[in-house]
Image (cartoon, helix red, strand yellow):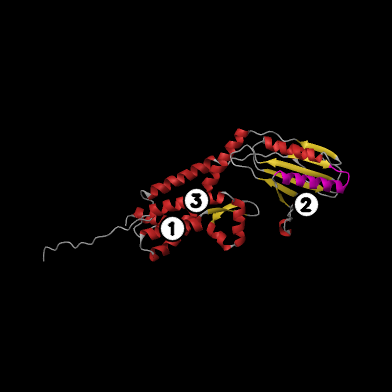
Amino acid sequence: MPLSQRMGRSAAGGLADQHGSMGLTTPAGAVMRWLMLIVVLLLGGCGEGYSTPQAVIRLEASTVGDMDAAAKTVASKLLALGFEEYPPKPRPDFMQQGLPPALIWSDAHATTFVRDGKAFTPGGALRAIVTPYPDANTPRIPYSTDIGSRPAPPFLELGISESRPQGFSEEGIAIHAEITKALEQHTGKLVIPSLPKRGDDQEYLISQIKDLLTTLALWLVVWVIFMTIIGGLAMVGVRRLFARTALRRAALIFIGVAFVTPVSTPTAIVQLLMPSILLFLSPEALVLMFQSMGATLPIMFALSLALSTLTAFIFIRDRPKISRTTPNNPGT
Protein backbone atom coordinates (compact mmCIF):
# COMPACT_ATOMS: atom_id res chain seq x y z
CA MET A 1 0.00 0.00 0.00
CA PRO A 2 1.41 3.47 -0.86
CA LEU A 3 2.68 5.62 2.02
CA SER A 4 0.04 8.33 1.44
CA GLN A 5 -2.78 5.85 1.90
CA ARG A 6 -1.23 4.43 5.08
CA MET A 7 -0.91 7.95 6.52
CA GLY A 8 -4.55 8.67 5.62
CA ARG A 9 -5.72 5.52 7.37
CA SER A 10 -3.77 6.47 10.50
CA ALA A 11 -5.14 10.04 10.62
CA ALA A 12 -8.76 9.07 10.13
CA GLY A 13 -8.79 6.20 12.64
CA GLY A 14 -11.35 3.45 12.50
CA LEU A 15 -13.69 5.15 10.06
CA ALA A 16 -11.67 3.82 7.16
CA ASP A 17 -12.49 0.49 5.74
CA GLN A 18 -9.83 -2.03 4.91
CA HIS A 19 -9.20 -0.42 1.51
CA GLY A 20 -8.31 2.98 2.99
CA SER A 21 -11.32 4.92 1.67
CA MET A 22 -11.18 7.29 4.70
CA GLY A 23 -7.70 8.52 3.89
CA LEU A 24 -6.82 12.07 3.11
CA THR A 25 -6.80 11.37 -0.61
CA THR A 26 -9.30 12.63 -3.17
CA PRO A 27 -12.25 13.07 -2.82
CA ALA A 28 -12.50 12.43 0.94
CA GLY A 29 -9.27 14.25 1.71
CA ALA A 30 -10.32 17.27 -0.32
CA VAL A 31 -13.60 17.51 1.60
CA MET A 32 -11.78 17.34 4.95
CA ARG A 33 -9.22 19.95 3.91
CA TRP A 34 -11.90 22.42 2.75
CA LEU A 35 -13.94 21.75 5.89
CA MET A 36 -11.04 22.54 8.21
CA LEU A 37 -10.15 25.63 6.15
CA ILE A 38 -13.69 26.97 6.59
CA VAL A 39 -13.49 26.33 10.33
CA VAL A 40 -10.18 28.21 10.63
CA LEU A 41 -11.52 31.19 8.67
CA LEU A 42 -14.68 31.36 10.78
CA LEU A 43 -12.72 31.19 14.02
CA GLY A 44 -10.30 33.84 12.82
CA GLY A 45 -12.99 36.35 11.84
CA CYS A 46 -15.34 36.09 14.80
CA GLY A 47 -15.44 36.36 18.52
CA GLU A 48 -15.21 40.09 19.13
CA GLY A 49 -16.59 41.25 22.47
CA TYR A 50 -18.49 44.35 23.53
CA SER A 51 -19.39 46.15 26.73
CA THR A 52 -22.85 46.16 28.30
CA PRO A 53 -23.23 49.22 30.54
CA GLN A 54 -25.66 49.09 33.46
CA ALA A 55 -28.46 51.47 34.29
CA VAL A 56 -28.77 51.84 38.06
CA ILE A 57 -31.87 52.71 40.09
CA ARG A 58 -31.67 53.17 43.86
CA LEU A 59 -34.43 53.69 46.39
CA GLU A 60 -33.20 55.06 49.72
CA ALA A 61 -36.01 53.89 51.99
CA SER A 62 -36.99 55.11 55.45
CA THR A 63 -37.36 51.64 56.97
CA VAL A 64 -36.44 48.07 56.14
CA GLY A 65 -40.16 47.40 55.64
CA ASP A 66 -40.35 50.09 52.95
CA MET A 67 -37.29 48.58 51.28
CA ASP A 68 -38.84 45.10 51.28
CA ALA A 69 -42.12 46.46 49.87
CA ALA A 70 -40.23 48.19 47.06
CA ALA A 71 -38.39 44.92 46.29
CA LYS A 72 -41.72 43.09 45.97
CA THR A 73 -43.04 45.78 43.63
CA VAL A 74 -39.97 45.50 41.40
CA ALA A 75 -40.25 41.70 41.33
CA SER A 76 -43.93 41.80 40.40
CA LYS A 77 -43.31 44.35 37.67
CA LEU A 78 -40.43 42.41 36.13
CA LEU A 79 -42.37 39.15 36.16
CA ALA A 80 -45.28 40.90 34.45
CA LEU A 81 -42.87 42.11 31.76
CA GLY A 82 -41.82 38.54 30.94
CA PHE A 83 -38.72 38.16 33.12
CA GLU A 84 -37.80 34.90 34.84
CA GLU A 85 -36.81 35.06 38.49
CA TYR A 86 -33.67 33.39 39.83
CA PRO A 87 -33.59 33.52 43.65
CA PRO A 88 -30.34 34.16 45.52
CA LYS A 89 -27.98 31.20 45.40
CA PRO A 90 -25.13 31.33 47.92
CA ARG A 91 -21.82 29.87 46.81
CA PRO A 92 -20.54 26.74 48.56
CA ASP A 93 -18.09 27.40 51.36
CA PHE A 94 -15.09 26.14 49.39
CA MET A 95 -15.87 28.65 46.60
CA GLN A 96 -16.10 31.61 48.99
CA GLN A 97 -12.45 31.50 49.99
CA GLY A 98 -10.66 34.64 48.87
CA LEU A 99 -13.80 36.39 47.59
CA PRO A 100 -14.69 39.94 48.71
CA PRO A 101 -17.39 40.00 51.44
CA ALA A 102 -19.57 42.19 49.21
CA LEU A 103 -19.62 39.53 46.48
CA ILE A 104 -20.52 36.80 48.98
CA TRP A 105 -23.36 38.97 50.29
CA SER A 106 -24.62 39.69 46.80
CA ASP A 107 -24.73 35.99 45.93
CA ALA A 108 -26.70 35.22 49.08
CA HIS A 109 -29.20 38.10 48.90
CA ALA A 110 -29.41 39.50 45.34
CA THR A 111 -32.28 38.30 43.14
CA THR A 112 -31.66 38.07 39.40
CA PHE A 113 -34.33 38.51 36.72
CA VAL A 114 -33.59 37.51 33.12
CA ARG A 115 -35.51 37.89 29.88
CA ASP A 116 -34.06 36.32 26.74
CA GLY A 117 -33.88 38.32 23.55
CA LYS A 118 -35.03 37.14 20.13
CA ALA A 119 -32.47 36.51 17.42
CA PHE A 120 -31.99 39.23 14.80
CA THR A 121 -34.30 41.71 16.53
CA PRO A 122 -33.28 45.07 18.06
CA GLY A 123 -33.97 43.89 21.63
CA GLY A 124 -31.25 41.92 23.40
CA ALA A 125 -31.33 39.73 26.49
CA LEU A 126 -32.18 41.82 29.57
CA ARG A 127 -30.85 41.19 33.08
CA ALA A 128 -31.93 42.93 36.28
CA ILE A 129 -30.19 42.36 39.62
CA VAL A 130 -32.09 43.53 42.71
CA THR A 131 -29.96 43.81 45.86
CA PRO A 132 -31.21 44.92 49.32
CA TYR A 133 -28.93 46.75 51.75
CA PRO A 134 -30.73 46.76 55.12
CA ASP A 135 -28.08 48.17 57.46
CA ALA A 136 -24.73 49.91 57.65
CA ASN A 137 -22.84 46.64 58.19
CA THR A 138 -23.93 45.27 54.81
CA PRO A 139 -20.93 45.02 52.44
CA ARG A 140 -21.54 46.63 49.08
CA ILE A 141 -20.03 46.56 45.62
CA PRO A 142 -20.40 50.09 44.22
CA TYR A 143 -21.26 50.43 40.54
CA SER A 144 -18.74 52.12 38.28
CA THR A 145 -20.93 55.23 38.13
CA ASP A 146 -20.83 55.90 41.87
CA ILE A 147 -17.64 54.35 43.25
CA GLY A 148 -16.94 55.70 46.71
CA SER A 149 -20.49 56.84 47.42
CA ARG A 150 -22.54 55.05 50.05
CA PRO A 151 -26.07 56.21 50.85
CA ALA A 152 -27.54 55.76 54.28
CA PRO A 153 -29.19 52.33 54.67
CA PRO A 154 -31.67 50.87 54.24
CA PHE A 155 -31.79 51.13 50.46
CA LEU A 156 -32.62 48.97 47.45
CA GLU A 157 -30.39 48.92 44.41
CA LEU A 158 -31.39 47.70 40.95
CA GLY A 159 -28.91 47.24 38.10
CA ILE A 160 -30.34 46.68 34.61
CA SER A 161 -28.23 45.64 31.63
CA GLU A 162 -28.94 44.49 28.07
CA SER A 163 -26.73 42.28 25.92
CA ARG A 164 -26.19 44.88 23.23
CA PRO A 165 -23.01 46.74 22.28
CA GLN A 166 -22.64 50.06 24.01
CA GLY A 167 -26.22 50.53 25.16
CA PHE A 168 -29.91 49.69 25.34
CA SER A 169 -32.65 49.15 22.80
CA GLU A 170 -35.82 51.24 22.82
CA GLU A 171 -37.58 48.37 24.58
CA GLY A 172 -34.90 48.22 27.27
CA ILE A 173 -35.19 51.96 27.88
CA ALA A 174 -38.98 51.62 28.14
CA ILE A 175 -38.64 48.85 30.76
CA HIS A 176 -36.26 51.02 32.78
CA ALA A 177 -38.83 53.82 32.68
CA GLU A 178 -41.63 51.50 33.88
CA ILE A 179 -39.56 50.25 36.83
CA THR A 180 -38.67 53.83 37.75
CA LYS A 181 -42.32 54.84 37.64
CA ALA A 182 -43.30 51.90 39.85
CA LEU A 183 -40.66 52.81 42.47
CA GLU A 184 -41.84 56.43 42.56
CA GLN A 185 -44.97 55.20 44.36
CA HIS A 186 -42.92 54.08 47.38
CA THR A 187 -41.75 56.11 50.36
CA GLY A 188 -38.12 57.13 50.09
CA LYS A 189 -35.65 59.02 47.96
CA LEU A 190 -35.36 57.76 44.39
CA VAL A 191 -31.87 58.19 42.93
CA ILE A 192 -30.82 57.30 39.38
CA PRO A 193 -26.99 57.30 39.23
CA SER A 194 -26.92 56.20 35.58
CA LEU A 195 -29.57 56.37 32.86
CA PRO A 196 -29.81 53.73 30.10
CA LYS A 197 -27.81 54.83 27.06
CA ARG A 198 -29.25 54.17 23.61
CA GLY A 199 -27.22 51.60 21.67
CA ASP A 200 -26.55 51.10 17.97
CA ASP A 201 -29.04 48.68 16.35
CA GLN A 202 -26.81 48.06 13.31
CA GLU A 203 -23.80 47.24 15.46
CA TYR A 204 -25.94 44.86 17.52
CA LEU A 205 -27.13 43.04 14.38
CA ILE A 206 -23.52 42.63 13.23
CA SER A 207 -22.54 41.24 16.63
CA GLN A 208 -25.40 38.72 16.46
CA ILE A 209 -24.22 37.48 13.07
CA LYS A 210 -20.65 37.15 14.38
CA ASP A 211 -21.84 35.25 17.45
CA LEU A 212 -23.85 32.90 15.23
CA LEU A 213 -20.84 32.20 12.99
CA THR A 214 -18.60 31.64 16.01
CA THR A 215 -21.06 29.20 17.56
CA LEU A 216 -21.46 27.36 14.26
CA ALA A 217 -17.69 27.11 13.81
CA LEU A 218 -17.14 25.78 17.33
CA TRP A 219 -20.05 23.36 16.91
CA LEU A 220 -18.51 22.07 13.69
CA VAL A 221 -15.08 21.63 15.32
CA VAL A 222 -16.59 19.61 18.17
CA TRP A 223 -18.59 17.49 15.72
CA VAL A 224 -15.55 16.68 13.55
CA ILE A 225 -13.38 15.78 16.56
CA PHE A 226 -15.87 13.47 18.24
CA MET A 227 -17.14 11.95 14.99
CA THR A 228 -13.56 10.95 14.27
CA ILE A 229 -13.12 9.45 17.75
CA ILE A 230 -16.53 7.92 18.51
CA GLY A 231 -17.44 7.10 14.92
CA GLY A 232 -14.03 5.64 14.22
CA LEU A 233 -14.10 3.34 17.25
CA ALA A 234 -17.67 2.27 16.55
CA MET A 235 -16.99 1.43 12.91
CA VAL A 236 -14.32 -1.06 13.93
CA GLY A 237 -17.07 -3.23 15.38
CA VAL A 238 -19.67 -2.31 12.76
CA ARG A 239 -17.48 -3.68 9.95
CA ARG A 240 -17.45 -7.05 11.67
CA LEU A 241 -21.21 -7.10 12.27
CA PHE A 242 -22.46 -5.80 8.93
CA ALA A 243 -21.03 -6.72 5.57
CA ARG A 244 -23.51 -4.72 3.52
CA THR A 245 -22.59 -1.14 2.74
CA ALA A 246 -26.13 0.17 3.41
CA LEU A 247 -26.15 -1.26 6.93
CA ARG A 248 -22.75 0.18 7.75
CA ARG A 249 -23.85 3.60 6.50
CA ALA A 250 -27.06 3.45 8.56
CA ALA A 251 -25.05 2.50 11.66
CA LEU A 252 -22.68 5.45 11.21
CA ILE A 253 -25.58 7.87 10.69
CA PHE A 254 -27.27 6.64 13.87
CA ILE A 255 -24.02 6.96 15.85
CA GLY A 256 -23.45 10.47 14.53
CA VAL A 257 -26.92 11.70 15.47
CA ALA A 258 -27.44 9.88 18.77
CA PHE A 259 -23.94 10.00 20.26
CA VAL A 260 -21.89 12.69 18.50
CA THR A 261 -24.26 15.67 18.14
CA PRO A 262 -22.72 18.60 20.08
CA VAL A 263 -25.18 20.00 22.61
CA SER A 264 -24.96 22.76 25.18
CA THR A 265 -24.13 21.56 28.67
CA PRO A 266 -24.55 24.34 31.27
CA THR A 267 -21.87 24.41 33.96
CA ALA A 268 -21.34 26.65 36.96
CA ILE A 269 -19.44 29.22 34.86
CA VAL A 270 -20.00 28.79 31.13
CA GLN A 271 -21.90 26.67 28.64
CA LEU A 272 -19.85 24.02 26.88
CA LEU A 273 -20.49 22.08 23.69
CA MET A 274 -20.09 18.37 24.36
CA PRO A 275 -21.14 15.22 22.47
CA SER A 276 -24.61 13.98 23.29
CA ILE A 277 -23.29 10.58 24.43
CA LEU A 278 -22.13 12.18 27.69
CA LEU A 279 -25.64 13.38 28.50
CA PHE A 280 -27.08 9.87 28.47
CA LEU A 281 -24.95 9.11 31.51
CA SER A 282 -26.96 11.50 33.70
CA PRO A 283 -30.72 12.23 33.68
CA GLU A 284 -30.03 15.61 35.29
CA ALA A 285 -27.76 16.53 32.39
CA LEU A 286 -30.52 15.69 29.91
CA VAL A 287 -32.94 18.00 31.73
CA LEU A 288 -30.41 20.84 31.75
CA MET A 289 -29.77 20.32 28.04
CA PHE A 290 -33.45 20.70 27.12
CA GLN A 291 -33.80 23.75 29.37
CA SER A 292 -30.71 25.53 28.04
CA MET A 293 -31.08 24.83 24.31
CA GLY A 294 -34.86 24.97 23.84
CA ALA A 295 -35.85 25.50 20.21
CA THR A 296 -32.25 25.20 18.96
CA LEU A 297 -32.03 21.52 19.97
CA PRO A 298 -33.92 20.13 16.91
CA ILE A 299 -31.74 22.30 14.65
CA MET A 300 -28.57 20.81 16.15
CA PHE A 301 -29.77 17.23 15.62
CA ALA A 302 -30.97 18.01 12.08
CA LEU A 303 -27.57 19.48 11.20
CA SER A 304 -25.84 16.46 12.72
CA LEU A 305 -28.10 14.16 10.67
CA ALA A 306 -27.12 15.95 7.45
CA LEU A 307 -23.39 15.82 8.26
CA SER A 308 -23.56 12.19 9.39
CA THR A 309 -25.33 11.19 6.19
CA LEU A 310 -22.80 13.05 4.05
CA THR A 311 -19.92 11.44 5.97
CA ALA A 312 -21.41 7.95 5.62
CA PHE A 313 -21.80 8.21 1.85
CA ILE A 314 -18.36 9.75 1.32
CA PHE A 315 -16.30 7.47 3.53
CA ILE A 316 -18.18 4.16 3.39
CA ARG A 317 -18.22 2.67 -0.08
CA ASP A 318 -18.76 -0.67 -1.71
CA ARG A 319 -15.70 -2.81 -1.47
CA PRO A 320 -14.19 -3.39 -4.90
CA LYS A 321 -14.23 -6.95 -6.10
CA ILE A 322 -10.72 -8.28 -6.53
CA SER A 323 -10.38 -10.77 -9.35
CA ARG A 324 -7.67 -13.35 -9.00
CA THR A 325 -6.10 -14.52 -12.29
CA THR A 326 -3.48 -17.16 -12.78
CA PRO A 327 -0.75 -16.20 -15.25
CA ASN A 328 -0.35 -18.45 -18.21
CA ASN A 329 2.37 -21.02 -17.80
CA PRO A 330 4.01 -21.59 -21.17
CA GLY A 331 5.62 -24.77 -19.86
CA THR A 332 2.33 -26.63 -19.50
Q: Secondary structure at mark 2?
A: helix
Q: Which residue is mark 1?
A: 252
Q: Which residues are magenta?
A: 60-81
Q: Is residue 23 visible?
A: no
Quadrant of the rendered image containing residue 96: bottom right
Q: Which residue is mark 2?
A: 109
Q: Is residue 33 left or right of residue 86?
A: left
Where 41 sits versus 310, above or below? above
Amino acid identity at mark 3:
Ala
Residue drawn 72% across the image and 48% down it: 112
Q: Along the line of sight, which residue is nearer the eye, 259 or 15? A: 259
Instruction: Estimate the spatial distance between the alpha carbons at disc 1 and disc 3, rounded to whole Å.
Output: 15 Å
Instruction: Estimate the spatial distance between the alpha carbons at disc 2 and disc 1, rounded to whole Å.
Output: 50 Å
Q: Secondary structure at mark 3?
A: helix
Q: Specify the farthest residue to the front.
A: 80
The x, y position of residue 224, in whole percent, is 48, 52
The x, y position of residue 246, in whole percent, is 37, 58
**Mark 3 crowd level (few <14, some 14–19, many ≥20, 10 Å Cα):** few
Q: Which residue is mark 3?
A: 302
**Mark 2 crowd level (few <14, some 14–19, many ≥20, 10 Å Cα):** some
Quadrant of the rendered image containing residue 251: bottom left
Residue drawn 57% across the image and 42% down it: 211
**Mark 1 crowd level (few <14, some 14–19, many ≥20, 10 Å Cα):** many
Instruction: Estimate the spatial distance between the alpha carbons at disc 3 and disc 2, rounded to whole Å.
Output: 42 Å
Q: Along the line of sight, which residue is nearer the eye, 190 or 327? A: 190
> Does the CB distance between marks 3 and 2 fall below 8 Å?
no
Amino acid identity at mark 1:
Leu
Amino acid identity at mark 2:
His
Considering the image in quadrants, where does the C terminus appear? bottom left
Q: Earlier in the sequence, mark 3 or mark 2?
A: 2
Residue 61 part of the magenta segment: yes
